[in-house]
Amino acid sequence: MLQISSLIQSELAQIRGNFTGKDIVSLEQFAVDDIRLLFSVAREMKRVAVNNMPSARLAGYLVSLLFFEPSSRTFGSFCAATKRLGGQTLDIQNPEAVTSVYKGETFEDTIQVFEAYSDVIVLRHQLAGMARRAAEVASIPVINAGDGNNEHPTQTLLDLFTLHERFGRLDHLKGLLVGDLLNSRTLHSLMRGLSLFKGNTVYLLSPQLLRLPADEIVSLRARGLRIVELASEEDIPRDCAFWYWTRVQKERFASSADYQAVARQSFVATPELLARYASKDMILMDPLPRVGTIDPAVDSDERAVYLRSQIRNGLYTRMALLALVLGL
């Protein structure tokens, strides 16, 4: 495990109502009021984006997008968020091939190089803990865009915003979480986010080898999140407010054969499954990419929000986060 200084641990612990200059590395930093503040600004940003309102809020600022792992939505939405607000981006995808990392430059040196050019670094990395490591090195804000199988805090912020927009609250909700519970940083962060609010229950359904580790279940229960593990689709409660589907993460497996063996046991959201178990008022979410998770026949169901409000909310919440972190 990475050893982080006590100073950095303290800095990452809480937003405390003030995002300015802060690293956004983990949901552990957030309290309920911090999330409410972000949502307030995100609603303002939604008006800007939906109405194509010109904005110079980030004019003169440059955001480095440093993505060591492939990304469509997170990379694209951070790029769009910056430019919607009048800022500029320095786009670096696959740094191991196109920067001096290829020549053997250390991760720390790479972070300090891009720190010299920009006002914020948005970092995605295939290894858990690298966002914290970058935050320790950089003197400008670092935003975690996903680190290995650890966390994806900005995805959770957009997911919570999606739930709040639909239900008007984030407490006393029941959710079904399906897929790669072992490796999905999205699910790890989402459960931490839900644990901030009272009375939430999540039902977990995954292949046996991809179950949530027992120690994480104990930790989340200690935070007040009710967790129920399901054995099969037949155990799905019919009163869930939301379903959250995730893919089996091929990139976390040692071989294609290992991946295929587990993928064959994965669950797919189909029209038949929704008809049997889903309430008429629920919503179906997926952080995407959709790889063996949701039958395209479900797309026309009005409850399917993954290609509608959920993906769009990524733009609004990331616009809000950049503005708040830069104190604008």
Image: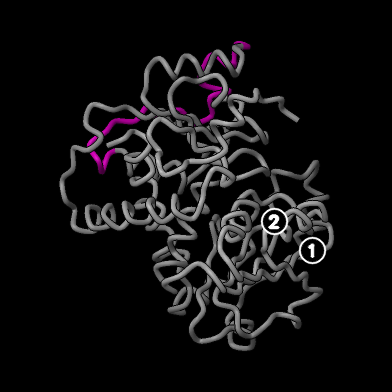
Q: Could you tell me which residue is drawn at 27 percent across and 39 percent down?
A: 83
Dot 2 and dot 1 residues touching (CB under 8 Å)? yes
Can you say whether 62 is above or below 239 in the image?
above
User: Which corner quadrant holds the C terminus?
Assistant: top left
Mark 2 Cα within 10 Å, few/some/many (few <14, many 20+)? Answer: many
| Magenta stretch: includes residue 192 | no
The amino acid beneath tag 2 is Val
Question: In the rendered view, would you say 84 is above or below 277?
Answer: above
Residue at 70%, 71% in the rendered image: 203
Q: Secondary structure at mark 2?
A: loop
Sequence-first disc among 2 and 1: 1
Residue shown at 60%/84% (left/top)?
239
Q: Is residue 234 left or right of residue 120?
A: right
Q: Quadrant of residue 137?
A: top right
Residue 130 placement, left or right of 171: right
| Numbered disc 1: secondary structure | loop
Residue identifier under label 2: 248
- Find residue 207 and name its label: 1
Question: Who is closer to the viewer here, 272 or 190?
Answer: 190
What are the residue bounds of the magenta stretch?
83-104
Label tally? 2
